[in-house]
Image (cartoon, rainbow, N blue to C red):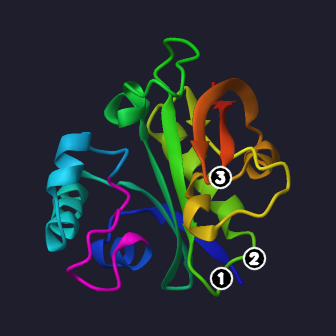
Amino acid sequence: MTIEVRPATVFEDVRTLVGPKRPDASVCWCLSYRIPSKLNNELHGPERGEYVRTLLEQGPLGVLAYDGDEPVGWAAIAPRADTSFARNRKIPHVDDLPVWSLWCIRVRPGHRGQGISHALIEGAVDFAREHGAPAVEAYPLDNQGAKIDQTMAYAGIRKNFEAAGFTWAADTTSVLAGHPRVLMRRELT
């Protein structure tokens, strides 16, 4: 299997990874950290997908991993200043560097355990670098080897980010699926 990571620009492919199985479902669409909380709570069912379609018209929302023409993985990445992490009280700011945030990694069932999340992390870092990011931050779970519910594993796990050259930058007060999240950073300059 050869995995290629490309900017997320094709709506149908984004929908395959983060859209609902039922069109009327009000699932994440990976909007919860990308848009203000009030707007996120106001968007229901198909409105969420249409909002993503509109955002894609402005540019990529992250990166997608492809096995041939099949989208098999997703990573959300954007300047931290453009996300709710800019105001998040539980995840600290390390300094004033205009970092990018990598907050969601998703690999489709049937494709897990094949290194796709590692390719997504590297592809997201490359995407941020190409857009002038001086560093990338992630906020993965520090699960210390414990099993994680796949639904809540979207933040990634610390060891995968360490393997990608990220280092611990700060502890957070954020907890997800019973595990603390840590702030990991990879300098790009």
Among numbered discs 2 and 3, the one appearing first in the sequence: 2
* Mark 1 → mark 2, Cα distance in angstroms: 6 Å
State which quarter of the image contains the C terminus: top right
Local SS, label 3: helix
As drawn, is 20 to the left or to the right of 48?
A: right
Q: Position of residue 125 (x, y in %)?
A: 59, 45
Residue that label 2 marks: 114
- Amino acid type, label 3: Glu
Residue marked by disc 1: 111
- C-beta proximity under 8 Å, tags 1 and 2: yes
Q: Mark 3 — residue? A: 122
| Disc nearest the viewer among 3 and 1 | 1
Q: Amino acid at mark 1?
A: His
Q: Residue furthest top?
A: 96
Q: In the rendered image, which quarter contains the N terminus?
A: bottom right
Number of residues whose C-alpha sits closer than 10 Å to that of mark 3, classed few (under 14), some (14–19) or many (20 or more): some
User: What is the magenta range?
Assistant: 18-31
**Residue located at (84% from left, 48% from top):** 144
119 in relation to 76, above or below: below
Residue visible at 33% across and 68% down in the picture? 27
